[in-house]
Amino acid sequence: MPALLTNVFCLLLALGALVAIFRRWSDHFLFSAIVFGAGSAMLATAVVCGFNAPALWQAPQVFAIGFFPITFRLDTLSAIFLGLLGCVSVATSFFSPGYLSHLNDRIHTGHYWSALCLFLLSMALVVLSADAISFIVFWELMSLSSLALVGAEHKKHQVQRAVLIYLGATRIATAFLASGFLWMHAITQSWNFSEWHFDNPASYAPAFLILIGFCIKAGIWPFHIWLPYAHPAAPTPVSSLMSGVMIKIALYGMVRLLVLGDLNYQPLAYLALFLGTVSAFWGVLFALVQHDLKRLLAYHSVENVGLILMGISLALLSKTAQLPEIAAIGLAAGIFHCVNHGLFKSLLFLGAGCVDAQAHTRDLGHLGGLAKRMPWTMVSFLIGSAAICSLPPLNGFASKYLIYQAVFQNMWLSGSLVDRGLSIAIICLLALVGGLALACFTKAMGVTFLGNARSKGAMAAKEASTGMIVSQLILALCCFVLGLSVPQVLLILKPICEAAVHQPTNIENAFPIPQAGVAIALLTLALLIYAICMHSSRVRKYITWECGFGDLSSRTQVTPDSFAQPVARIFSPILRYRVTFEITGKDRRHFPEQIKVEPQMVSILEQKIYLPAIWLVGQMARVLAKIQAGSIHLYLVYLCFTLLLLLFLGTAL
């Protein structure tokens, strides 16, 4: 059954990609959306089979990659990520037709739907791949199809720059992965993942290459530079799939290869923990000072993939320290947060897309007052914000609690004083990250939906289409259901955790908080407050103090800069944050005519590392370009020397 469903799914998506190219079909959003949604539903059906009947099979020989047959594996781990992909893609299929209608002629809709079908198909096949050859081929298809989607509005200079940055990141990530895969094949003489084990010193170097390749694709610090460029440039449904699912596939690869492959090299686990910790802090800090709503959400992806990597690295460290219960909790926390973040981040991106489509801007400084104009979008965005801030009883609270649980238990049970001190530092940093995330989404919610409109576009905004609302409600409902189903989720994750630590665990007891009881208590409290407020029917009006300027306007409201400025000043050494003032007028000291305040921020990594590195590569390219003299004789000499060098290296090795 899994093989049959997978074959039908592949044929359906391939057909959708081919049909969408023809211009006569490209204007019919509904047809492409139905094909895309049907493929997503087919994927969800395969997930059910994966939980009940794990399977390993080969694709028909006609689809073989050269001499290598394509092999697939559907088990509990792959079924979890396929379920996430199916859920997000179903929501995307409802959202896309209404969203694309506001882009008019800015993108080629036929190319968009064709690339979107290939993107969904490639992500599913990467997760199902059971060998390195299939994995890297479908990984490349995933990278190239997502690259085409990021460049959908290719006429914009900003989009062109984002495409180049994302292209560079995908090439480097693939180079690291391919190097690690080739090295592991040289060690094991096999391409099958089931025969790869990282518990011997010979495999530590390829494990490092594989880890870095996955970190680049996942957007882990300091390789996250492509995320804040690609997500704002891509259409919102694409941003939802990329942030919600694609970057999680890299984390899936870490779990599949490194954790289940028994990596026992402590320095590599400490490196992963360091990268995850810095990524969580760096992402939430830079998110707080962003103006663009989608760029803000992109930086929060950097934060949350850092949290997921922290859970995975804690599992690796605890395995080497012979603490299987902590390893199981850390792994469960990482996988669970993968799913949770995929749901509420996709929900938030779809909400940002609704705001962009209706108000025609994502700049927080030009929004405001959308709560009454777009109530459904506001409620959905509020649910997503509460989930990403880890507020109970939503799903974000459950997985974040498990991360805390793993760190606390590591602090008490670890025999190393270094690990105990490190655990205390991580707990403090997690608390700081949680506080900054709460401040960031208070800003995003308040500035976007509350107060008065700050622009004509925000003032004329109306609620999004029915399909766009339904897509958000689907994901919001999933956030509630997963938040109330933590014991059932832990039972699903238990076989994966036991396979990782090679012994039975009691992971189902790691979450003692009754989420359903918390939900009932909060609902009761809300109804009680509402009843008390409604009991007083007398309406009282007060005059708001307007500082003597007359009627209040949108200029007297809190701006995104003024909200974030206190925190930005505290962390100015990291953010390179400064504010410039410009006051004009004849007697500007006493009677200023115009005051202009402009905050400025510089990315340290871009200015100090990436731009100098790009300049160096450019200089090297100019030097190497001189060898292209246009002489065939000179090229033959180059070829001769290259062959001699390869022969020498081959005999020496």
Image: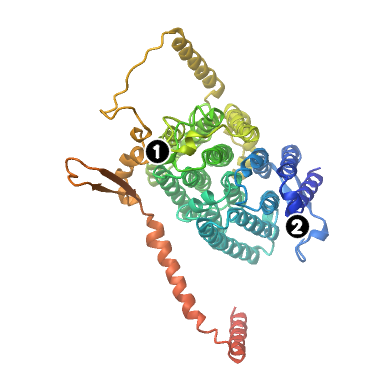
Going by the numbered disc 2, the residue's amino acid type is Ile
Are there few (<14), some (14-19), or many (20+) residues within 10 Å of tag 2?
A: many
Disc nearer the start of the sequence (2/1): 2
Q: Dot 1 lies on which element?
A: helix
The residue carrying mark 1 is 436
Q: Quadrant of residue 469?
A: top right
Q: Which mark is residue 622?
A: none
Where residue 588 sits, quadrant-wise, is: top left
Q: Tell me, yes or no, if residue 217 can be seen here.
A: yes
Quadrant in the picture for the N terminus: top right
> x, y (%) of residue 532?
45, 10
Q: Nearer the viewer, residue 354 or 502?
A: 354
| Depth order, front residue of 640/244 | 244
Q: Of the residues shown, which amino acid type is indicated by label 1?
A: Leu
Residue shown at the point (45%, 51%) measured from the top left: 275
Residue that carries the numbered disc 2 in the rendered image = 70
Q: Nearer the viewer, mark 2 or mark 1?
A: 1
